[in-house]
Image (spheres, rainbow, N blue to C red):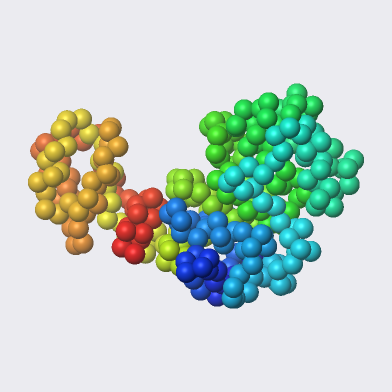
Amino acid sequence: MQALLLDHVQKSFGQVQAVKDLSLSIEAGTIFGLLGPNGAGKTTTIRMIMQIIMPDAGEIRLFGQPNSPEQLEKVGYLPEERGLYGKMKVGDQIIFFAELKNVPAKEAEKRARQWLQRFQMDSVWDKKLEELSKGNQQKIQFIVSILHEPQLVILDEPFTGLDPVNTQLIKDIMLEMKSSGCSIIFSTHQMDQVERLCDAICLINRGEAVLQGDLREIKRRYGRDTVILEYEGDNHFLDRLDFVKKVNDFGNYVEVHLTDGTHAQDLLKAAVQQVEVLKFELVEPSLNEIFIRTVTEE
């Protein structure tokens, strides 16, 4: 079953066309990456899904039905900009937002205390939100977005302000939700997280979908023209190799992109003559590299 369908959706603000003829579909029980550079139209798309703004043309369907407030009750939304009340107590706030999603107060309190315990935040129940750190505020925002047990969750930069331990905890929860049949739209600029979590992606640039589909298939489509080279020595010899298209230098290793038709062995032969090779691995391009290639070509 499709959790979400966008069919030729468009939105303009004056002379600026923010979203142009965008179509995509998200299956139930999947994690879908909604990607793009700043100003690409991601936030506008999300706001149209949430009916914060309405599309100029096209159709949005949730769970096989036309988008409506009734369907949106089954959706959770964590915005990039926090939407909570700084001077309201944490416990009261979580219950308030849960009741807006038709969760009875007693049940909302029970679920809220369970989630706070999982995040090791039992002590914040009676604290005002503004008294918490940015990371803890983000965790409260996340709890609010999922407390009503939605069938679709939209997470816009969910890891903002979180340390590695809590980032991993939220990733674990996302995977648990997926396994229970929940669909997740994951919007972020952290391509490494997208690679680890997403089943499919849609890359938007200038309001248009420029790349979308199954993530593994997309990576296969780009071929294996990238070498991870870990070494000791001076890597300036790479600048003199005419079959090296691009080098991303990460300090203790480099990501080398080869020209079409080049054999990785050619690079290995050149490298062993110049540096001590510690690791040499032919890999698919990273999603980060695919993102940059696609956007710059556009």
Q: Where 33 falls versus 113 (above or below)?
A: below
- Would residue 279 be found to the left or right of residue 73 on screen? left
Can the viewer see residue 249?
A: yes
**Residue placed at 54% from the left, 52% from the top?**
187
Horizontal and vertical percent for residue 112?
79, 37
- Would residue 245 be found to the left or right of residue 88 on screen? left
- Would residue 36 be found to the left or right of residue 139 on screen? left
Q: Please state which of residues 232 and 116 is positioned toward the viewer in this rendering.
A: 116
Q: Quadrant of the N terminus?
A: bottom right
Q: Quadrant of the C terminus?
A: bottom left
Horizontal and vertical percent for residue 136?
64, 31
**Residue placed at 70% from the left, 34% from the top?**
86
**Residue placed at 17% from the left, 51% from the top?**
244
Can the viewer see residue 19?
A: no
**Residue placed at 27% from the left, 44% from the top?**
248
- Would residue 71 be found to the left or right of residue 288 on screen? right
Quarter of the image for residue 292 reads bottom left
Horizontal and vertical percent for residue 58?
59, 76
Q: Please state which of residues 130 and 69 is positioned toward the viewer in this rendering.
A: 130
The residue furthest top is 123
